[in-house]
Amino acid sequence: MNNSQTTPKYVLAIDLGSGGPKVGIVDQEGQVIASAIERNTIQFFPNGGAEQDPHEWWQTISRAAKSVIRASNLPPEAIFAVTCTSQWSVTVPVDENGDPLMNAIHWMDSRGAIYNRKITQGFPSVQGYGLLKLLKWVNMTGMVPTQTGLDAMAHMLFIKHERTEIYRKTWKLLEPMDYINLRLSGKCVASQVTVIPMQLVDNRVQNPGDYQPWLLEASGIDKSKLPELVPNGQVIGKILPSVAEDWGLSRNTDVILGANDNQTAAIGAGAVLDYDFAVVMGSSGFLAGHLPFRKTDIFHMLTTLPSPLPDRSLFWGELGNSGKVLDSFLNNLIYGKDRYSQQPNPDDVYDRANEMAEQVVPGSDGVLCMPWFNPPLGPQEDRYMGGGFLNLNHKTTRAHLTRAVYEGIAFNWKWLIGPSQKFAGRNFPYLRLGGGSAQSEVLAQIMADVIGLPMHCLADPRNANVLGAALLAFYQAGILSLEEIPGKVKIAKVYEPRQEYRELYEKIFKQFLASFKALQPIYHKLNK
């Protein structure tokens, strides 16, 4: 790769997450020289509905982009490219002008679950799936439409069957990053790695170039309503003049097709070489890394997916419950806006949570948190499971509950790590730790203690996806080599597991698993 450029180059990277966009300008040494965060809202509806407003996405992204471009003080021509990474399994139907026809169906939305079950049922049945359909879907895509409906297939089918007029008017069904690229470039395209959650592409080959006929027929989705597929990492075109003028960019700025946030999170954590893994603790949580083979473990919801990096597969283990559990606990149970409230939420709410958790001894005096505030995905999907606390008594305080939430999140991660190591065929010597929740030193240490592995905490975990999207763009542009990427990712601190708590946490972990199994029948009766 050519690292001898006399003029430094920069990338404007957009990370559109559930909570809102993070936008940053990154140089080729991996430094985020300016960044901004905006907030988006999620609207919840009865029967499992969850939606976001694509217009709000664009407004907040534009506001953040203009902010960081001004703050960088760079000449417009120094920013040679803009790229976008985003949450996925979020569906935006647009008309021929690229305008959204309704809110985006969010990945938390489960209203299409019934349609997933209809297209995948059959005899003989395995965990609700027709065996032959299950094998064919997994073989082709590495995935299968979920029973919970938390995927793009269910969202597209929900629109088709319950928003029929919108489906009729739909020109294209898009993932968020492809919608943003349409707004940036005026071109409606996607790639194999951006349409992964649609489960309509044969992932046994890299860049297949078209949707797979059997998958289209089995799903009932009209191919005409899907975006054109182009190679991974392609330069889509130049930024629209109107956007360039509004944001303060050169009209020669390239728009580079990015990847979803699982993929850029692994790259932003430095996990680009084989068998190097990263724990990403955002609103949801997932384990990501790269492997030199394809494989799927349907029983633990583990798989490999196409990587934007050539000749590699991205390991994907979706937890489904991570930072959002702490947010729900703090916003609904501690600082809920109701008749019990005495003051607005403090600005330092997370600092207070860390202080409260540190006041309690490891093990939370026996209080156990079941963190399945969303239906769990890996390592055991169950659309009827719920969360809660066990073993409360008259001495239980909010501090106990707070530490129990931290430990419950860590126990859930430990549960995922076990089958993931078997999947990879080797034990992990350490884990890279990124995502917004990794900013908590208390949680990082609890993760190390509970899982029993060193946690290499990123120096800038909140911007891991921004960094990953930018490093991927530098690689795709031929400015960085793959081997150079890990050295561009800074590690702030390594949290070693404390051996004095190993036996305690192993004991509690056994009860954590036993609680899941014992309470499943009760939650099923309550939630079906």
Image (cartoon, rainbow, N blue to C red):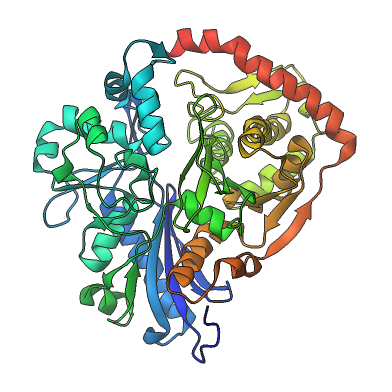
**Relative to residue 86, is residue 215 drawn left or right?**
left
Q: Quadrant of the C terminus?
A: top left
Any part of residue 330 in sight: yes
Q: Where is residue 292 in the image (x, y as percent from the top left)?
A: 56, 49
Q: Position of residue 469 (x, y in %)?
A: 47, 62
**Residue furthest to the right:** 500
Q: Position of residue 258 (x, y in %)?
A: 39, 60
**Relative to residue 435, is residue 472 drawn left or right?**
left
**Residue furthest to the bottom:** 6
Question: In the image, what residue occupies the spot 24% across and 57% down?
Answer: 189
Up-down relation of residue 260 to residue 3 (above or below): above
Q: Which of 171 and 190 is in front in this view?
A: 190
Q: Nearer the viewer, residue 103 or 184?
A: 184
- Which of the 4 image quarters holds residue 80? bottom left
Question: In the image, what residue occupies the spot 41% across and 57% down?
Answer: 85
Up-down relation of residue 421 to residue 179 (above or below): above
Q: Position of residue 184 (x, y in %)?
A: 27, 66
Q: Give the number of marks.
A: 0
Any part of residue 150 in sight: no
Q: Nearer the viewer, residue 1 or 405?
A: 1
Q: Which of 469 and 399 is in front in this view?
A: 469
- Which of the 4 image quarters holds residue 357? top right
